[in-house]
Image (tube, grey):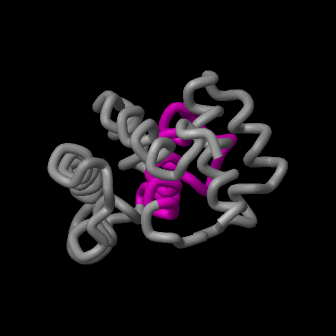
Amino acid sequence: MPTDQRPSSIASKITALIASTNDEILRDISRYDNHGGGGVTYEQACDMHFHGLKDMISNHNCRADWSEHYWYPMEAVELRAFVPDNGDSWSFAVAILILLLDDIEDGGRDHMEARSSERFRKSYRALPPDYSKLISDGLKILEET
């Protein structure tokens, strides 16, 4: 396996791309948990998801600490990743990259069938090359291991 295709190399590239995400995209991801619940309003939940994403990116090197990020922000990330053809494709790409990074590093295979479907692959191909290639490389690693 070429050095640039190793899981650690792909994870580093994914981390860098997630870390470069602007606040507008993070706020879009945050909106996908479309209910408050738990005593918070929808607007408060969106804000909590946004701050959870910022914390995850800034203080946890883009990795979800599931004891801390289980609901905020990961519920919104997972929900955004389920709808490839809805809304801003940038937020979809970043949500997928966050989940791929988690799967590559933790060995999980959450929702691989959906993420590997032709519907999703079509959405990946429509993304800018730096995103689509990383997603494709990440999926390939998960499929091979």
Magenta span has 24? no
Q: Considering depth in this image, is 78 or 111 the residue closer to the camera?
A: 111
Q: How far across and down, in percent of the image, does residue 49 sit?
A: 28, 55
Task: Check the image and report above or below for 13 versus 64.
Answer: above
Can residue 43 be seen?
A: no
The image quadrant of residue 52 is: bottom left
Q: Quadrant of the C terminus?
A: bottom right
Q: Is residue 101 above or below residue 22?
A: below
Which residue is at 60% across, 49% downward?
Answer: 138
Q: Which residues are magenta?
A: 76-104
* Residue located 61% across and 22% down the image: 128
Give coordinates of residue 47: x percent, y percent. 23, 50
Residue at 51% x, 60% y: name it.
Answer: 104
- Residue closest to the eye, 131 or 39: 131
Asked if residue 64 lies left or right of residue 48, the reply is right
- Answer whether residue 9 is visible to the viewer in this image: yes
User: Which residue extends farthest top?
Assistant: 128
Residue 40 sits above or below residue 56 on the image = below
Judge from the rendering whether residue 87 lies leftward or rightward of residue 55; answer left or right: right
Q: Is residue 78 magenta?
A: yes
Where residue 137 appears, x then y in whole percent? 64, 43
